Amino acid sequence: MLLSFVISSLGEYSNADPIDGFTEVPLTEYNFELQKPYDIPLEQRYSFIDGVRKLWVYADDKPHDPNSHTQPRTEIRIRGLDYSCGVWQFEGYGFVPNGTSGATIAQIHGAAKGATTIILRIYYGDMRYYSTDLIATDMYDKWFRLNIIHDVDGGSVTVFLDGNQRFQVPDKGPGDLYFKCGVYAAPANISYYMESRWRDIKIYKK
């Protein structure tokens, strides 16, 4: 069922730049909320130099909150732009160094059922939808342009890499939705050190 949806829908955006028809939403540093291991200073897991945001975490780090039982993370949560309807888009240029594996590098948090609408993970240089569907290979050690379009009303999420549509999937219903990027350890099969870098992060909407 999922495969047939993906195949039948791949042409929807494929002949246009993903930001065509969208309006950019202005961002300030307030919109970039940092989540990191609760017992470590931010500068030991995050840097922002020459426009590049570098986020890293270790497999034995603490969660972001002392009351949380989730996996370690250093992530940017787009703050102040939560949404529950309409069409929204995340754009950013990402970089994942060789060796990072089992790390979520981008996600839409929130759903009618479950915690997330979509998770993009890196496993051994491949990008996957959660730990299943393969989206792209050979992702290590190069900058890539990532666009994620969430059509809440239409019930779909579309992923682009370097301007090309690579994946589309039904969403998981409306909720309190927002975009995140960085590194968030998967439940299993993770590298000890995980890192991603981001620049030129933008949010668009229709």
Image (tube, rainbow, N blue to C red):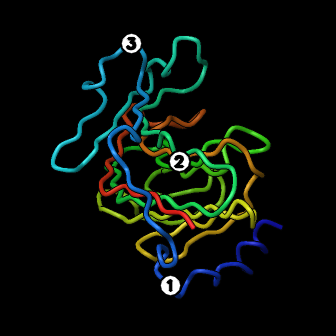
In this rendering, the answer to whether 26 lies above or below 186 is below
> Which of disc 3 and disc 1 is earlier in sequence?
1
Name the spot of residue 42 as percent of width and height, x first. 30, 24
Which quadrant holds residue 146?
bottom left
Mark in the foreground, 1 or 3? 1
Separation of residues labelled 2 and 3 (CA atoms): 24 Å
Which quadrant holds residue 205?
bottom right
The amino acid on which the numbered mark 2 sits, given as a three-letter code, is Phe
Badge count: 3
Residue at the outermost right position: 1
Which quadrant holds residue 41?
top left
Residue tagged by mark 3? 39
Kind of element beneath mark 3:
loop
Name the spot of residue 127 as percent of width and height, x first. 51, 58
Q: Which mark is residue 65?
A: none
Relative placement, left or right, of 106 versus 119 is left
Residue drawn at 62 percent across, 61 percent down: 150
Residue tagged by mark 2? 179
- Which of the pair 11/56 is nearer the observer? 11
In this rendering, the answer to whether 91 lies above or below 75 is below
Look at the image and tell me in which quarter the C terminus lies.
bottom right
The amino acid on which the numbered mark 1 sits, given as a three-letter code, is Ala
In this rendering, the answer to whether 141 lies above or below 75 is below
Residue tagged by mark 1? 16
Residue drawn at 35 percent across, 51 percent down: 96
Is the residue marked by circle 1 packed among few (<14), some (14-19), or many (20+) residues within 10 Å? few
